[in-house]
Image: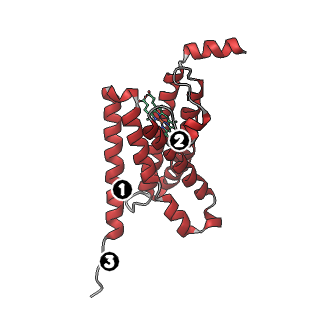
Amino acid sequence: MNHLFTSFSHLFPVWNITRAAGITSYLLLFLSLVSGLLIGLKAIPTKVRPMLTLIHTTGGWFGFLFGMLHGLILLDDHYVGYTLSDIFNPFTSRTDTFLNGIGTLSLYCLLLVMISSDLMKRIGRRAWKVIHFLTFPCFVMALYHGIALGTDTSMIWMKWTYLSTGIIVFTLMAFRVGKRNKPLPSRG
Ligand code: HEM
């Protein structure tokens, strides 16, 4: 069994798995946020709404699961020697304390949003909405964490991924906030 695990880690080194899981988690978070923002737009046809809702919720939960995998895999790294506390106690990690802490906060933020959505009936729509707005800081933290800490940030494809996903989310968010704050047309 031990031998099997050793060959597995030879085939897929810890840092490759954690990087792949981190990028997957980030992209799922992006998909979840974008589909959620699109659902709120009037221009979106009713027939595509169920599909967007599915992407929104599934993307959120799988984004969280890949985020967990991304963190937990670090336990198998013998170079830094991460502990459970490094990973789950924000801002206590032995290396890159701040940047790792931001990753942990983003993970917790995402968990809170997903659980509050499942419990919407119990906590009420108002509380759910306030918590749901955390999705945006959660995305910004994940984006900052990935850019600043990731090895792949030096790659051109990753730079474009961060840039395009960031611009799409910020534009949709600004559009949504702008719509909400627009004064109602006067009756007279
Ligand atoms: C939902 C939460 C999280 C997301 C979306 C996320 C996303 C990412 C992304 C996109 C990268 C860049 C990967 C690359 O360039 O190849 C990254 C790197 C990293 N993350 Fe996270 N992360 C999250 C949570 C965490 C947690 C909880 C930890 C543990 C403390 C952590 C530790 C790291 C480390 C050590 C790296 C550097 C890996 C490398 O050398 O590229 N992350 N993360």
Tell me how the rendering is colored.
secondary structure
Tell me the element at label 2: helix
The residue that disc 1 covers is: 173
Cβ–Cβ below 8 Å for labels 1 and 2? no
- Give the amino acid type for the residue marked by disc 2 in the picture: Gly
Please report the residue visible at 58 percent of the width from the left and 57 percent of the height from the top: 117
Residue 63: mark in rendering: 2
The residue that disc 3 covers is: 184
Q: Quadrant for residue 30, please give it.
A: top left
Cβ–Cβ below 8 Å for labels 3 and 1? no
Please report the residue visible at 55 percent of the width from the left and 48 percent of the height from the top: 108
Q: Residues within 10 Å of mark 3 (few under 14, many from 20)?
A: few
Q: Position of residue 64 (x, y in %)?
A: 55, 42
Q: Earlier in the sequence, mark 2 or mark 3?
A: 2
Q: Residues within 10 Å of mark 1 (few under 14, many from 20)?
A: some
Please report the residue visible at 49 percent of the width from the left and 55 percent of the height from the top: 49
Q: Residues within 10 Å of mark 2 (few under 14, many from 20)?
A: many
Q: Quadrant for residue 172, please give it.
A: bottom left
Q: Position of residue 163 (x, y in %)?
A: 31, 39
Where the N terminus falls, by quadrant?
top right
Q: Position of residue 177 (x, y in %)?
A: 35, 63
